[in-house]
Amino acid sequence: MSRTNIAVLAMVLTGFSAGCEGSSPPAANTASTDSSQATMRGGMEGMSGMDSMATSDPADVVTGHMREFETLDADSMIRALAGHRQIIANMIARMNREMREMNMPADEAWTATVDSLRADLIAMPDMSARELRDFIPLHHRRASKLIEMHRRMMKSMGM
C-alpha cells in the first residue's frame, strides 16, 4: 500500500470514527496515527477492499476486508490487528448510531452479536499468532451476522 493510500485510509478512518458520536474503539486500541499506519503497512498491504473505503458501502468494505484478512498468515494478522480492530469498532459504532437515529430498538440477537464482537476485539490482542489465526473464522462469522442483521433492519425501514 503506498504512502498516499495509507494517508487517505487514515483520513477516511478518522472521519468514519468522528462520525460515530460518543463512541470509541476498544480501550486496548490507543495507537497513534503513525503507529496505525505502520501496522496497516505491515499486514494489510495490498488489501484491495481498503482502497475503496471512501466510495463503497462500509458494510461491503468490511466484508471484503474480512475475507482478505482471513487469507493473511498468522504473523501478518498480528501486524494488521490494530487496523482491523479499528475497522470493526467503527462498523459497530456506525450501525448503532444509524439504529438510534431511526429509533430502531436493538433486539436480543443484535445485542448478543455486538457484545460478542466487542469481546473479540478485547481478546484478540492477547492471542498468539496461531490462536488469532484459528479464531478469525469465528470472528468473521460474527461480523457477517451483524452486517446481515443490519441490512435486514435497514431494508425493513425502506432504506
Image: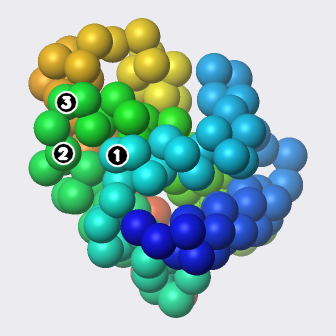
Q: Total number of numbered labels? A: 3
What residue sits right under mark 2 in the picture? 72
CA gap, disc 1 and disc 2: 8 Å
Q: In x, y percent, where is residue 33?
A: 71, 47
Q: Do the residues bearing badges 3 and 2 touch, measured as CB atoms within 8 Å?
A: yes
Label 2 Cα crowd, 10 Å radius (few <14 / some 14-19 / many 20+): some
Q: In x, y percent, where is residue 108?
A: 47, 36
Judge whether 156 appears above or below 40 on screen.
Answer: below
What residue sits right under mark 3 in the picture? 74
* Residue appearing at x 63%, y 39% in the figure: 35
* Residue appearing at x 65%, y 62% in the figure: 10
Amino acid type assigned to the residue bearing label 1 in the image: Gly
Judge whether 97 appears above or below 50 on screen.
Answer: above
* Residue appearing at x 77%, y 44% in the figure: 23
- Tell me the number on the disc at residue 24: none
What residue sits right under mark 1 in the picture? 43
